[in-house]
Image: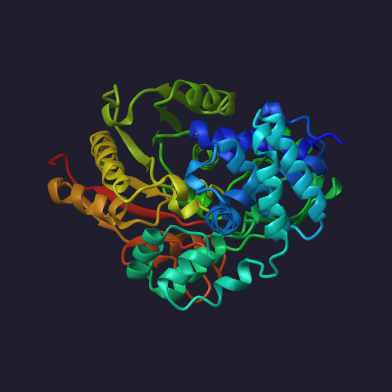
Amino acid sequence: MPISPARNAAFAILLRVNTEDAYAAELLHASQFATLAPADHGLATELVMGVLRWQSVLDEKITAHSSQAIHKLDLEVLICLRLGIYQINFLERVPVRAAIHESVELVKQARKRSAAGFVNAVLRKAAQQSAKPGLAAIGNASTPQELAALSAHPAWMVDRWIKIYGFESTRQICNYDQRVPQTAIRFTDPAAEAELKAEGIELGPGELLTSARRVFSGDITRTTAFRAGRVAVQDEASQLVALMLGKGEKLLDCCAAPGGKTRVLAEENPRATILAVELHPHRARLLRKLAAKSNIEVLCADSTQIPITVQFDRILVDAPCSGTGTLGRNPEIKWRLKPEDLSDLAGRQVAILQSAMQRLCPGGRLLYSTCSLEPEENQEVVQQVLSSHHGFRLLHCQTELDFLQRGGRLSREAGGKIPLTAGPYLRTLPGVHSCEGFFAALLQKTSEKQ
């Protein structure tokens, strides 16, 4: 019996994620896998994301039933074991025999035929275990160690979140990270909403923004409107960050790819001149396609040394960051990131922010944002820069949120019982709020003197 296209795709993607530092979400939408039937693409997505979300739990089960130390296993063998155990423990509709058989066949196909018997034995032992891991177990955690183990998060990450946000908020973050995130969208053409409904897409209102929609059922990426660029998938917190920059005549978007916030800026400022700066040539090329027939000009350059002297009245610095606020969509990050990476990231973030501040005209506003939960990348970067740049002041983000709410843009229920701000900053937490984790600080230039 041949291996199913979904499992073949899942194995290939997981191998690249582990060997190339690729991102699963991008690979799942790559042209190589675009020809998969909807059902196969859905299963491949479930397998890839499920294995990455629950990787440490799966490895613990492999260790419990393996005669070999897990670090000594060939990567191909380890991936096949993770795929098999994930299906056995998390996918009730997949027959155990199918999960075992296809995992064994994948090992053979990967030219690791000598490990076929080993994989078969480990998976059969795992299938006999009655205890099943999952989301319900996260609620039983009473210590940081239990929470990290049951929610498949690195212990160092959980420990630091508890110190920053408290145990219960950290539990909510971990719980959110382990769920399939609900898709949020925005329309570049309001008429697309009716088209989506006609194609069988079930939509609901946004949780934060009145213009956003949540997808309750259906594959938005296979619709005509999505392919034509008239609807975009974008988390509501990401949309909100772009809206908070406000109106201007000359806008600069640093580190602009993949371009979601850039598009929001263009739609909100249709008569403005917008310069989008992106370091990586291949991402700049994609950004140019996205920006075609708009008021966006794309410049491939390093945002730490922007090669222009023009000044702008609105600047967005959506800085490259650890991405710990997006682990629900990018679970591979939690297995790659190390504590020492945060200081390296912060150094680059400071350099980008300082460079952008030099391009801001007096009275202009700059929004610094990340999708990180870590203070080193957020308020500490802002505080460090402000301590040496005296011609700037920190504005309170709540003022801008109130303005958006009065204008009917921000839902009156946004944030629920938990404010969207922490001090003067925007601060959303996955699970605590119904969106990904974003941080934003709003700066205003008060004089030429810096």
328 on left or right of 366: right
Figure colour scheme: rainbow
Question: Front-most of 240 and 190?
Answer: 240
Q: Quadrant of residue 88?
A: bottom right
Quick check: can you spot residue 309? yes
Q: Residue at x 87, y 36 (%)?
A: 1
**Image quadrant of residue 159?**
bottom left
> Where does the image place residue 433, in percent across and percent down from the top left?
52, 66
Relative vertical location of residue 424 with respect to residue 292 in this rendering, above or below: below
Position of residue 419 measured from the top left corner of the image (x, y, whole percent): 44, 71
- In the image, residue 34 sits, relative to residue 85, either above or below, namely above
Location of residue 63 in the rendering, given as x and y in whole percent from the top left corner: 54, 55
User: Residue 261, image x and y in percent?
Assistant: 50, 41
Q: Is residue 441 above or below residue 233?
A: below
Foreground residue, 417 or 66?
66
Q: How many marks?
A: 0
Could you tell whether 163 is left or right of 66 in the image?
left
- At a point 51% along the width and 69% down the height, the residue shown is 172
Vertical arrangement, residue 173 with respect to residue 332, above or below: below
Residue 192 seen in render: no
User: In the rendered view, does 280 fall on the left or right side of 363?
Assistant: right
Residues 215 and 89: in front is 89
Residue found 14% across the figure and 41% down from its top: 450
Q: Nearer the viewer, residue 156 or 247?
A: 156
- The residue lying at 55 percent from left, 66 percent from top is 175
In the rendered structure, the answer to whether residue 185 lies left or right of residue 271 reads right
